Image (cartoon, rainbow, N blue to C red):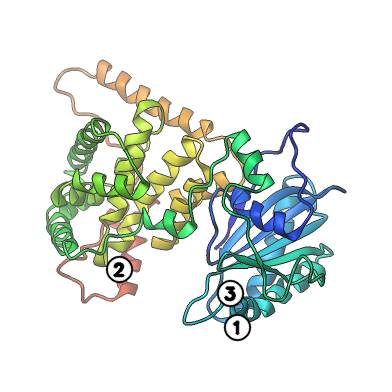
Amino acid sequence: MTEHIDPSQPSTEDQITLRSPAELADALPYLMGFHPDDSVVLVALHGGRGRFGGRLRLGIPSSPEEWPDVAGQLAECLVTGSEKRGSRPEGVIVFLCQDPHGGESGQDVMERLRPLAQRLRTACGELDVPVLEALCISDRRFWSYCCPDVRCCPAEGAQLALPGTSVMAAAATYAGIQVRGSLREMEARLAPLTSPAMAAQEGALDAATAELVPRILGGVGRETVCGETLDLVKRLLVRFADVPASGSPRATDVLDDALVTDEEAAAIILGLQDRTTRDRAAEWMEGPEAEPALRVWRAMARRCVGVYGDHAAPPLTLAGWVAWSSGDEPAARVALGMALRADPDYLFAKLLHQGANEGLDPELLRRCLRQERTGRAEDRRERPPGQAPGRPRGGTRPVRSAGRSRSRSRNRNRARRRTGPRGARSGG
């Protein structure tokens, strides 16, 4: 439900002091790494000088009936999470970010969200952690729910600083911190394509399901399908590496989509539903392999169209893993959060999301994956000619035959996901 961000602690040098609601509002994208549109953000403050600590982000619930429970959960999660990392917050900053819709003005949004801001202030206060400032950001303006001074926080709202002109922007540029656009833009890079041509992609997924699922679930052909899937991914990595990304993120994604046929995408998406195949694919995580791998996984996630939306969990998780391994934690959290929306029970995404949120070093997992790759290479060298390799470790994430069986209920599909071949439990 939430994204808990535990940033690295700032050094004692080059610290920035934010003195007003305007400077706090301008700093938010740099604190998060992106513009958190349609979001509730809570930021913990520590010590007498209010040092920034952990951060929580959640999409604003559309129903006000959910706000009391959500406010209590967010406050408790922020406080307990901060305590686990060493210290209880001295205060909290609340941000409510949502642009107008349906003929609203920014001021209308602010008033509509006022009860949510009050719920958050009350929930934090009940935990003896005061909300020192609560801001609504909408339509390039901000309002304070706490500051009564109309000179800095007028009733009509105050204009945000132009991008790149605030003191925080200058400090972030000096430190090499980038803002990757809005959350909506980041998610769009991973969302299923919606063009009319995607009907052909869904047809290719139907055909791949009919051909590959019996082989994977039958066990006998599982290792062969794994090898075929990984060989195809290798070819795409070379293809993508030969066509460097250029221009805007949108232009890069359009370019990447043109590099993959419907049949190739379908074969990879279905192959990745097998846990062993997915784990092997996770080994493309660093060095010159990382950048084309991230582009490939994004492209695969975009091809999970129609009834195959929940098949996006493996490529989204791999995209999150490569981003985290490459040091891009905001992009990693976005991808992993989308993977858990596609399949809330997907274990690999849960573990990576928890690791990124708790500030773990991805090198621990990289080391394990390197050892797996080295072990397989040694096994191939030592195996006598003609001897078949041992049965792969791990289980199979069951593959749903979605295409021609679309009338099946969603509950039945989800029940099948929890059972592997011959009744074995499936792993995420």
* Residue 387 at least partly seen: yes
Q: Secondary structure at mark 1?
A: helix
Res 373 quadrant in image: top left
Q: Name the residue tied to disc 1.
A: 65
Res 136 quadrant in image: bottom right
Q: In the displayed structure, does residue 368 sit left or right of residue 166? A: left
Q: Which numbered disc, 2 or 1, marks the residue that appears first in the sequence?
A: 1
Q: Is residue 11 above or below residue 267?
A: above
Q: Where residue 161 appears, x then y in whole percent?
A: 63, 56
Between 173 and 74, the one lying in front of the other is 173
Q: Name the residue tied to disc 3.
A: 106
Q: CA distance from mark 3 to mark 2?
A: 42 Å
Q: Secondary structure at mark 2?
A: helix
Q: Is residue 12 above or below residue 56?
A: above
Q: Are marks 2 and 1 in contact (CB under 8 Å)?
A: no
Q: Residue at x 19, y 38 (%)?
A: 232
Disc 1 marks which amino acid?
Glu
Disc 2 marks which amino acid?
Asn
Q: Where residue 198 appears, x then y in whole percent?
A: 19, 61
Q: Where residue 163 appears, x then y in whole percent?
A: 56, 51
- Nearest to viewer (mark 3 / mark 1): 3
Disc 3 marks which amino acid?
Gly
Q: Secondary structure at mark 3?
A: helix
Q: Where residue 114 appears, x then y in whole percent?
A: 68, 78
Between 277 and 304, the one lying in front of the other is 304
Q: In the displayed structure, does residue 342 sit left or right of residue 136? A: left
Q: Is residue 261 above or below residue 124?
A: above
Q: Are marks 3 and 2 in contact (CB under 8 Å)?
A: no
Q: Residue at x 36, y 22 (%)?
A: 374
- Nearest to viewer (mark 3 / mark 2): 3
Q: Quadrant of the N terminus?
A: bottom right
Q: Name the residue tied to disc 2.
A: 413
